[in-house]
Amino acid sequence: MSQTGARRPGPDLPLTFDDVRAAADRLAGVAHRTPVLTSRTLDALTGATVLLKAENLQRTGAFKFRGAYHRISALSAAERDRGVCAWSSGNHAQAVALSAALTGTRATVLMPEDAPAAKRDAAEQYGATILTYDRYGTDREDGVRHLTEDRGMVFVHAFDDPMVMAGQGTAALELIEDVRTLDALVVPMSGGGLMAGSATAARALLPGVELVGAEPAAGNDTALSLAAGRRIRIPVGRTIADGQQAATPGELTFEVNRHAVDAVLLADDDALIATMVLLYERLKTVVEPSGASALAVVLANAERFAGRRVGVVLSGGNVGAARFAALLSSAAS
Amino acid sequence: MSQTGARRPGPDLPLTFDDVRAAADRLAGVAHRTPVLTSRTLDALTGATVLLKAENLQRTGAFKFRGAYHRISALSAAERDRGVCAWSSGNHAQAVALSAALTGTRATVLMPEDAPAAKRDAAEQYGATILTYDRYGTDREDGVRHLTEDRGMVFVHAFDDPMVMAGQGTAALELIEDVRTLDALVVPMSGGGLMAGSATAARALLPGVELVGAEPAAGNDTALSLAAGRRIRIPVGRTIADGQQAATPGELTFEVNRHAVDAVLLADDDALIATMVLLYERLKTVVEPSGASALAVVLANAERFAGRRVGVVLSGGNVGAARFAALLSSAAS
């Protein structure tokens, strides 16, 4: 605990608590203030008091709406005329698509070819134009360059943008406002935007809180990067957690998270499926694989969290019923 | 609408609004005040304003806890010493088991052999003793007679008991308190206890509300009975809606419902599965087949409900993930 002072975000970081509070003001009445779910079963299984921030119930089914709307709603009239573009495995795509529709601009989204069909369909239903790329190849950056340089669109990064990070942090801000005290906060990590925003809010309101990231075992770029003290790039993780396949942490998010995050714990695919089933059967709530990751690491490390008040972000719920059934049969076989 | 006066429950009925209010007082702080869920998607699909009372989030995963706890918590000390018994396809079993545990008595429950394993396991986990019978045979009454006459237990009926009916009615009471006005209220029906209690509350608070029951197409005993003006018994319905397989309406519930219910609409198994998938994918919430029936009939009869404020009870959410997957594949084949 002697490092507490050093770990606290300082004025040299790309994000401050005032930024998160400003995002909360902008999101009021637009984003859902999602509920905090509790369960006697979860508390019995973990020995902890588990407080679930249900971002699976956020608009577009994931926390991503917070950051995207915060960013896009701040565009100038000239920027809105040119439109926005983004790349996303799915949830950021829907978030950008809806935010564009709500603010009177147009969205074009690059999505990997293997993104879940439900996520692609949803982004199209919100009115976005979808272009696809090979997730395991390298043509994504070329696509973005064409849209921004040749066509003048504003690129909305999924995480490495202070306004996006500030928007995502409103999830933790609301959770802490609602439950008042926490001993630990467990947040799914991919690019690191949700954690960067959440950590900024949590460190300001609860300086002693332990901040724990959750990553898929096959996509542990943040765990490796924090251990190395610099951003490590890994091959794109082959995991069912399609929302957590970033190959390396963001540059700005890592600046925040390297100071703020106490530990990153890993969940393998079977643990993600088991957690999805537990949430389905006992809490009657639907999370996607990425959305289950924070609770999965709490369940797998119950002794670490026993006796404490633990905030856990369920980051998203966009999984089709048929895909859920297929995941169940893959885990059972 | 000239029949409105005649349809209103009068003092000769087995249940009054005061009974429902008394049940609400007894349940305060014990049962969950479940949330009212809304969805832009549902409103767009139906043209109505749909207000979902989420009893899938009730303790034990279904509205049944309300009635069982109301009944069992009123037992005398001598009755508690002898214990309670019940028969149930599942949700009443869990409700009786938990209510017995909370009030310091013991429960023995007769369940059909083909009841979902998740429901049987849950009742056992709450400490109940489970005995099984053949749902399509006739040995259930013999089992109950043995437990009550030979062993002195108090029988807790799943629906045909004024205290149980009053407890179930608190679901509609809460919904109306929360949403204030409704043009129609759609309630799943099996034995008719949830409707009898809900109708009693709704007619008192909103005299002009249309009351619509929902039954599985293969278990339409209430629709037939209301049309005939007397209780009709049918063979046990072979439907996936395991919570709606009563062969005939209750005697007391029918006395209330024959005056109160305006219509009964039917849902076949494919419509129940499609509604479960819609709730899973768009509202991220889990309902069992019976729990989907009221929303299923609203979706199938959208023109009837368009432009109106429609309360819909999601009565339960006790379906295992593996069973959900099996239902999906049966519907797809």
Image: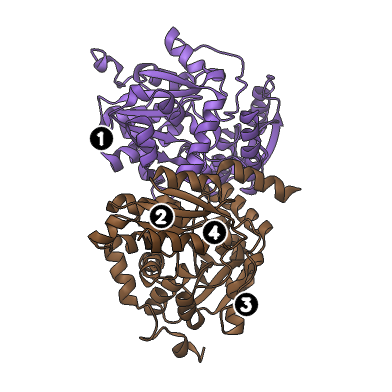
Chain colours: A purple, B brown
Residue B184 spot, x, y in % from top left: 50, 73
Residue B24's disc is: none
Residue for point 49% across, 47% down: B120
Q: Which residue has dot 3 on it? A: B224
Element assignment for label 4: loop
Q: In the image, what residue type sits under mark 1? A: Thr
Location of residue A238 (image quadrant): top right
Subunit bearing disc 1: A
Tell me: A181 left or right of B256.
left
Amino acid type of disc 4?
A: Gly
Disc on the earlier residue, 2 or 4? 2
**SS at mark 1?**
loop
Q: Earlier in the sequence, mark 3 or mark 4?
A: 3
Report how far apart the C-alphas of labels 3 and 2 lie in the structure. 29 Å
Q: Chain of mark 3?
A: B
What is the C-alpha distance between the residues marked 3 and 1?
56 Å
Q: In the rendering, at what x and y percent does residue B274 appear?
A: 65, 54
Q: Read off the residue under disc 1.
A: A181
Name the side, left or right, on which B57 lies relative to A327: left
- Residue tagged 4: B243
Circle 4 Cα neighbour tier, 10 Å, few/some/many (<14 / 14–19 / ≥20): many
Give the residue type at disc 2.
Answer: Ala
